[in-house]
Amino acid sequence: MVLDRLTAAMGDRGEARPGQHAMAHAVAQAISTESNLVVQAGTGTGKSLAYLAAAAAMGAKTVIATATKALQDQLADSDLPFLVEHGGKPVTWAVLKGRSNYLCRQRFDEIADPAQRSLEGLETLPERELEGLRTWVEVTTTGDRAELDVEPSVATWAAVSVGPQECPGAQKCPRGDDCFAETARRRAGAADITVVNTHLYGLHLASGRMVLADHDLLIIDEAHELPDIVSATAGIELSAGRFDNVARIAGGLLAEDVLVESIHTIGERIVRAVAPFAGNRLVGGVPAQVADLLVTAGSRLAEVADALRKIDTKASPDVATRAARVQTASTALANDVATFLAPPTDAVVWVENDRDRARLCLAPLDVGATLEELLWNPETTGLEIGGSGPDEDDDSGPGRGGLPATVVLTSATIPGGLADQLRLPPDDTEILDVGTPFDFGSQGLLYCASHLPDPRADGYADALVDELVTLLDLSGGRALCLFTSYRVMQLASAAVAERVEYQILVQGTRPKGVLVRAFAVDTSSCLFATMGYWQGIDVPGPALSLVTIDRIPFPRPDEPLWQARREAAGPRAFTAIDVPRAATLLAQGAGRLIRSATDRGVVAILDSRLATAKSYRWQLIAALPPLRRTADISEVATFFAAE
């Protein structure tokens, strides 16, 4: 069997993992019977090699969707090359990213002309960055932004790349034959195994399955993230930036300066009109004054379409491509404007505020219904909620709509009821828990600081800092300190740094990968971070011996989409919505601790409600690794003293 070859090639690291073999067998069986599988594979199972081995053994054309870049990198840098070298079967693989991750040769050709940059308002782009890209584009074979040694500014990269709502497709572009994004798609279409992020797979579904080639098997890793990602990719947003983008690219082509300026202006007026509603749901739809502006926006975009029809696109391939790009972007925007004027009945509309820039948002309330329409029902051709049309030109890519015969959802933590929430067909779905090879009872300790004030009470912040200092002194640093609030993280890290001798690394001061590597190398350092670090961090060994979590990560009560979900759930909303979400995140954070059979350490929950909230504490504890439990700080001291 392929998995036996892989474990044998691992030498001393290839210890027996019954859960890994059980998972590989279950995945192979699901492929054979064309059924679905939901499998919880605890930390240390080796789930990625399990599903890779099964896919290779069965010869299934496979797409793997991951929620984090860390797992994508692990698959591309380690697991897939290992499978190719030691699996005993010929396997080809590729990584495919969203279109805007690749430099667009056509856009780069266009803005090489200073006159064109001036027409689009891009004359301030740093020449040094453009020159660096000129050198790079001559040698790169992928055009992938991740290859760059120096990160370009946001404005520069936006000028040399295009998103799916702007690209007219390879057939309408002079550089379609050597397009980096199209080359990546062709490579992925020919590969046996393709790795994408889950957002891109969501866009594949929402576009009528026109991004990826047909495949037999879909594996969604980190599947606990799927409901939120489906909401994001099946929803739409209206921001000033989208109107600015249409105005910018139209300004480089159309002579109607007043029309182009009106597109920019209407976007700004919409943002100002929705700003007072920031953070709120629009239960009855958009307010009348916003609706009037949206109607005006639709009229302006229709005028853009009329102006485009007057352009002689046969005179120049370059002009034809730019006209097609403007048409694609303006049509997508017009469709989304129309959707906000008449939203689907099962959609939540709200106003988000990001860095003082408001934007209109819309997302499906029932992600299960969305997936039933897009993934489980083979007669479906696409979702209408977004209204933005296909991601690519109809003739520009390989797959045109085959649904995978088998879908595997896997994670170290599968929330209870996930299969029902996603409306997986019950007659064709197996649910399995293969456990974990780790002996959590002897390897670790779960400590709840039950003496601390309620996190919502006065005095909690000071008590939190005191408790962190005590714990860090007991562990000798070596701590990943996780927070639910960026503000609290900053305050706590500053206060703790003044009272301990250990290096305090703080999220935001350096890139994530750099911080994690520094934390792993300095075996007494402490890393303070928020939600982005609750998963995807793998630091085995003594450098990570303590994980602290400041509070139970309940969803914000005022978050509009969660509000709507609670209303739909009725009287049991807290138990059915909030607690399962908090339990999953808590388990993900605690799961950073034990990463190998020799790891030892403490998970410290600094929220007394884990000990005192009788109505839900056991639901949270049941989701956590089965560590030995205590509320006595002296047991923590004894545990670390015994190392």
Image (tube, rainbow, N blue to C red):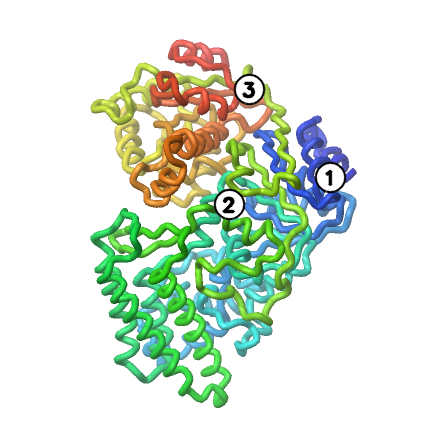
| Residue receiving disc 3 | 440
* Circle on res. 211: none
Residue 279: image location, x then y, percent: 27, 47
**Labels 3 and 1: the sequence-earlier one:** 1
3 or 1: mark nearer the eye? 1
Vertical relation: 289 (above or below) 509: below
Q: Residue at x 55, y 19 (%)?
A: 440
Residue at the disc numbered 2: 368
Closer-to-camera residue (566/1): 566
Where does residue 142 sit, x and y in percent of width and height? 57, 62
Residue 580 percent across, percent down from the top left: 45, 31
The amino acid on which the numbered mark 1 sits, given as a three-letter code, is Gln
Disc 3, SS: helix
User: Do callouts 3 and 1 mark residues in contact (Cβ within 8 Å)?
Assistant: no
- Indicate which disc, 3 or 2, sits on the residue closer to the N terminus: 2
Specify the quadrant that holds the N terminus: top right
For label 1, the SS is helix
Question: Eyeballing the image, is 577 above or below 231?
Answer: above
The residue shown at (36%, 45%) is 561
Q: Residue at x 78, y 44 (%)?
A: 88
In the rendered image, is residue 114 in sight? no
Q: In the rendered structure, which amino acid carries the disc numbered 2? A: Gly
Classify mark 2: helix, strand or loop. Answer: helix
- Residue at label 1? 29
Mark 1 to mark 2: distance in Å? 25 Å
Quarter of the image for residue 308 reads bottom left
**Residue 95 showing in the rendered view:** yes
